[in-house]
Amino acid sequence: MSTMLTGPERASIRLDPENYQFLQDLVYRESGIVLNRDKHYLIEARLSPIVAQQRMGSLNELCRLLRTAGPSTLRQQVVDSMTTNETMFFREPAQYEALRKVILPQVMNQRRDRRRLSFWSAAASSGQEAYSLAIMLREMGLDDWYIQIHATDLSSRILQRAREGRFLQIEVNRGLPMQYLVKYFRREDLDWVIRDEVRNMVRFERFDLRQGMGALGPFDVVFCRNVLIYFDLCTKRRVLGEIRNTLLRGGHLLLGGSETILGLDDGYELVPACGAVLYRVP
Ligand SMILES: C[S@@+](CC[C@H](N)C(=O)[O-])C[C@H]1O[C@@H](n2cnc3c(N)ncnc32)[C@H](O)[C@@H]1O
């Protein structure tokens, strides 16, 4: 007796090897993200909702459409869905601590004449990183400083969420101290919405890190956290080199906890502070 499968279950079976290769190539070409051989489950989990939404029978059918008349919005939806947007408020708190206590006081001393600080959250996801930074800067009381926070991501879908600044209870429960929730968010239905005074400090824009960065910056601090892990060596090197050129002398780069520049770029110097490691352009 054969079993009828429906919905996502049906969509998830029998992705032909050439279609797996096709999706790997497509995602790499459009984002730089490397999907290894064993990422079948990930492709199936992320793309099955698109298959269902498009009322297709299978992932193979989705691939057929993408190969032929594939509209660019569908291609973008597929690539968007393959990005991993995991993030949280004040992720890796030691880095924020290092910025607040050690790095920013030094940088502000260097910039005391211009009274201007410029930051870039380079893989911003749904905005928690940039908003955490904005909150930290407000708490530092830099009222007479001109502060710019530029926040970018490849995924238009996730950027739309970031701009809205609307978070679920479960999201504000992750990393956001209660006193900041009360001070910088307002309740709307079941969500928490960031107040305009914080939202207006951040400018969100789509940007692919593999693009030339000549028009960006200069920045005092760049957060490029938990995105290099998805790239191959060549892309990592190019991105790190380009970011270095967007940083002012004495500017700092922050990477994710499991990421490093070692063996990739020797133009930065390591700066240990408050249990974190940052990278400075000499
Ligand atoms: C895991 S999140 C990191 C979020 C945040 N930086 C953090 O550490 O919490 C990785 C983000 O990188 C973005 N991304 C992936 N490839 C990218 C690319 N080529 N250019 C820009 N952003 C990219 C994804 O869309 C995703 O939102």
Image (spheres, rainbow, N blue to C red):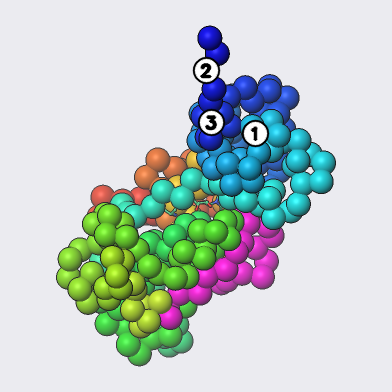
Q: Is residue 229 above or below residue 172?
A: above
Report x, y in % for residue 147: 43, 80
- Kindly identify the residue that appears in the image at 35 percent across and 50 percent down: 277
Q: Which mark is residue 57?
A: 1
Residue for badge 3: 6
Q: Secondary structure at mark 2?
A: loop
Q: Residue furthest right?
A: 68
Considering depth in this image, is 210 or 28 the residue closer to the camera? 28
Name which residue type carries label 2.
Thr
Asked whether mark 2 lies closer than 8 Å to ligand 1, one says no
Q: Quadrant of residue 232?
A: top right
- Circle 3 residues within 10 Å: few <14, some 14–19, many ≥20: few
Of the pair 55 and 94, the residue shown nearer to us:
55
The location of residue 262, given as percent across then percent down, is 48, 41
The residue that appears at 31% across and 57% down in the rendered structure is 171
Gap between marks 3 and 1, in whole Å? 9 Å
Amino acid type of disc 1?
A: Gly
In the image, is residue 220 part of the stretch drawn in magenta? yes
Q: Give, as a single range, the part of the protein colored magenta.
A: 200-221
Would residue 190 be found to the left or right of residue 131 on screen?
Answer: left
Does 176 appear above or below 22? below
Q: Is residue 41 magenta?
A: no
Check mark 3 vs ligand 1: CB closer than 8 Å? yes or no.
Answer: no
Per the image, the residue denoted by label 2 is: 3
Q: Quadrant of residue 201?
A: bottom left
Q: Is residue 183 visible?
A: yes
